Amino acid sequence: MSVSIGIPFGIIAAKRRNSLADYSLTTISIFGTSIPVFWLGIMMIYLFGVKMMWFPVQGYIPIEKDGLWQSLYSLTMPSFALGFQHISSIARYTRSTMLDVMNNDYVRTARAKGLTETKVYYKHALKNSLAPVVTLVGFSMAGMLGGSVVTETVFNIPGMGKLAYDSLMRRDYTQEQAIILFVAIIFILTNILLDIIYKWLDPRIELD
């Protein structure tokens, strides 16, 4: 969710630099980066769960019980609370890298050839600006894994983060070690995937 929302927001802000849309998205990004995960989760529970009764206030619905749609619906608030900070960071970073790339010679050459602004942005500028964003996404994963402990506790979701916290509280060190090993494997696989994406985005990069 962070990538699918953050990158388009950053592109829009870069395309409409110094416009109302740019100022609005930048303000939302700064606001989102400043909000603690637990506070946002509690406010969402109060507003959308208790007052408006749009979403369940705690727990989640397994896929095998009511299907994929209901499961995703029950995870809407926890997912948004966990990913909102990272949406803001990715949007700001995408905007900055896009603006840097737009000043390069090959972008001016693409415009001089008569290409439309859509092709200039999405075919020439976007791909070359995504490498730093991919790095940020990799680092954001660590923050999400840490933030999931808080999010799952606030929304009372029996996930990996809450399991790690409960294991630590009852001093179940064997289970805690297993969780740490599992998270380490996820990071290793993520770094391998990021290296592959780097190579796809910029063939000039040599992978040792």
Image (cartoon, rainbow, N blue to C red):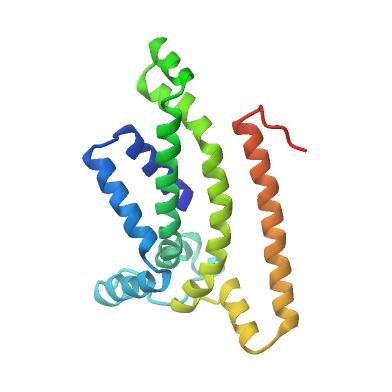
Left or right, 5 with respect to 20, comes to right
Quadrant position of the C terminus in the picture: top right
In the displayed structure, 40 sits above or below 193; it is: below
In the displayed structure, 103 sits above or below 133; it is: above
Return the x and y of residue 204 as percentages of the image width and height: 66, 27
Q: Residue at x 54, y 65 (%)?
A: 63
- The furthest residue to the bottom: 170
In the displayed structure, 196 sits above or below 105; it is: below
Left or right, 181 with respect to 83, comes to right
Q: Residue at x 50, y 63 (%)?
A: 67
Q: Residue at x 36, y 59 (%)?
A: 32
Left or right, 49 with respect to 160, comes to left
Question: Splitting the image into 4 quarters, where does residue 165 fall?
Answer: bottom right
Residue 25 in view of the camera: yes
Using the image as rendered, state which of residue 115 and residue 58 is in the foreground: 115
Return the x and y of residue 197 as percentages of the image width and height: 63, 39
Return the x and y of residue 123 as percentages of the image width and height: 48, 25
